[in-house]
Image (cartoon, rainbow, N blue to C red):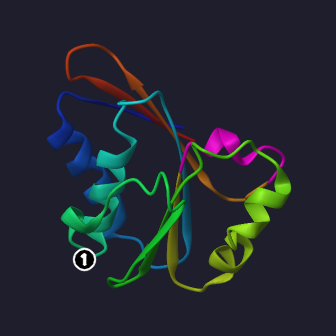
Amino acid sequence: MKEFITHSAEETFELAYQISESLTSTTVFLLEGDLGAGKTVFAKGIAAGLDIDPADVNSPTFTLVNAHEGRMRLYHLDLYRLEGELEEIYALGLDEMLSEEKAVVLIEWAERLGAFDIPNATRVQIVDEGDDARRIVMT
């Protein structure tokens, strides 16, 4: 478990950027946090570290999945609108995304995965600590 405190959106972005700079194989991030906690800011930082323009990364609330090409492919999922039914999760093609050799799969609202298990995923909990401070716990 690692815990970080960031004091601005820029620091949250930079933390994620530093994490993703060293990624070389398939990695899954399960992002959890309330609305406005900073999940999408974290996703933009991950994208930037993969040589993807962070301006192109927006929460795919209505499309559910966005794919971005960089030095590794980034799949950005937002499960906010899902009910956690396994049929919904399988319909997204998540199994195929997870089987790619060099891809980063980043899932916002991961708690909605329900019984769908992703071994070796990194859980990222982002908690609003007031003002612009965020506590980011990675397990």
In this picture, is 75 found above or below 132? below
Q: Residue furthest front?
A: 62
Task: Estimate the x, y position of residue 54 in percent, counting from the top left.
Answer: 22, 63
Q: Is residue 125 above or below residue 19?
A: above
Q: Is residue 98 above or below residue 32?
A: below
Looking at the rendering, which quadrant does residue 109 occupy? top right
Choose between 89 and 30: the one closer to the eye: 89
Identify which amino acid the numbered label 1 is placed on.
Answer: Asp
Residue 112 in the magenta stretch? The answer is yes
Of residues 6 and 53, which is closer to you in this image? 53
Q: Is residue 49 left or right of residue 34?
A: left
Quadrant in which residue 110 is drawn: top right
Residue 115 within the magenta-colored segment of the rendering: yes
- Name the residue beneath numbered marker 1: 51
For disc 1, the neighbor class at 10 Å (few under 14, some 14 to 19, many from 20) is: some
Image quarter (top left, top right, bottom left or bottom right) of the C terminus: top right
Please identify the residue farthest to the top as the structure is shown. 130
Residue displayed at 68% across by 59% down: 120
Residue 13 lies left or right of residue 110; in this view the side is left
Quarter of the image with the N terminus is: top right
Q: Which residues are magenta?
A: 108-116
Please tell me which residue is depicted at 42% across the width and 24% down the height of the picture.
127
Nearer the observer, 106 or 136? 106
